[in-house]
Image: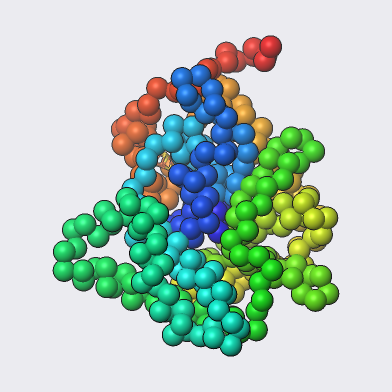
Amino acid sequence: MDSSIDEAVTPDAPDAAGTGTGPAAGGGPERAAGERGALAPVSLSPSRAGDFMQCPLLYRFRVIDRLPEKPSEAATRGTLVHAVLERLFDAPAGERTAPRAKALIPGQWDRLRESRPELTELFADDPEGERLAGWLAEAERLVERWFTLEDPTRLEPAERELFVETELDSGLRLRGIIDRVDVAPTGEVRIVDYKTGKAPRPEYAEGALFQMKFYALVVWRLKGVVPRRLQLVYLGSGDVLTYDPVPADLERVERRLHALWEAIRQATESGDWRPRPTKLCGWCDHRAHCPEFGGTPPPYPLPVRAPGSRAG
Ligand code: SF4
């Protein structure tokens, strides 16, 4: 999931998908402690790479300042649907039916609220439960649609919600969580990611595949095998987007990530995190702190190196 990125982060971005790579989950291990408890980034996930590409200031707010963000209905529904699709594979193949999957929703919703009590505020103003009922009904529709796109009775995932992490030769650490990994008897690997939003228009497909190529690069570096297929399953629109990568694709992604990491390093040292306003600002929780919207960022919590000075 991480949703998605130069490829802008949308409400259905990887974070929304509940891969655990959202602002809260992704901020921790991606940073190293600095002065006054502030943290400098030490690794990159698709979600955070996407944040920086979308808006460097957004990256700063999420990774360095760790400003809180309100849970959203769309993101939380994404997390819920992901949990249901993951758990369904606990059942024997023949029992992985749509009714069974839908029956998992209430229990997974309970689990989610227990693990993240802040989610109860989502429906705090809904005493009759009408909005919650509609929200759960939409989760059911998304789960049901999955069965028109894939047949879980014929799938036996090698991995579900797989945390992956690797260090490139340059020292850059890449990490993320892959929704599903299928391995064919021939050994060919397919990486699958579920999106609860709609498929992008064709001209944005490359952006949507960035996250998948990121994962493919990590798997290649970890296991020495280039995944045969990358597959994005869009439950919102009922589309499946696939791409069969070759090493040159992943080498390009690696170069791009190095350039991105260098830009992040420079911004971290200089404290110069530029806002980059786009229509996605409408989804940003940090407008009150953003100069583009008349706000002021909190004081920069990391030491700032003067231009031209070098690390000693
Ligand atoms: S409101 Fe827009 S420009 Fe400002 S931090 Fe958020 S994404 Fe960046």
Whether 128 is drawn above or below 4: the answer is below
| Residue 124: percent from left, percent from top | 21, 57
Left or right: where does residue 76 sit relative to residue 60? left
- The image shows a total of numbered marks equal to 0
Residue at screen point 74% across, 55% down: 219
**Which of these two is toward me, 128 or 254?**
128
Which picture quadrant has residue 49? top right
Quadrant of the snapshot with the N terminus: bottom right
Which quadrant is the C terminus positioned in? top right
Give the residue at x 51% y 85%. 97
Residue 74 in view here: no
Q: Is residue 297 above or below residue 250?
A: above
Residue 155: where, in percent of width, then height? Answer: 65, 79
Q: Does residue 174 appear in the picture of this structure?
A: yes
Rendered position, 226 above or below 199? above
**In the displayed image of the protein, which residue is found farthest to the bottom?**
94
Residue at position x 52%, y 44% from top?
26
Residue farthest left in this picture = 128
Between residue 78 and residue 297, name the one nearer to us: 78
Residue drawn 26% across the image and 53% down it: 121
Where, by quadrant of the figure, is residue 294 drawn?
top left
Instruction: Tell me residue 301's x, y (percent).
Output: 46, 22
Q: Position of residue 244 (x, y in %)?
A: 74, 67
Quadrant position of ligand 1: top left
* Display colour scheme: rainbow
Q: Is residue 48 above or below residue 191?
A: above
Q: Please give left or right for residue 294 compared with residue 88 in the image.
A: left
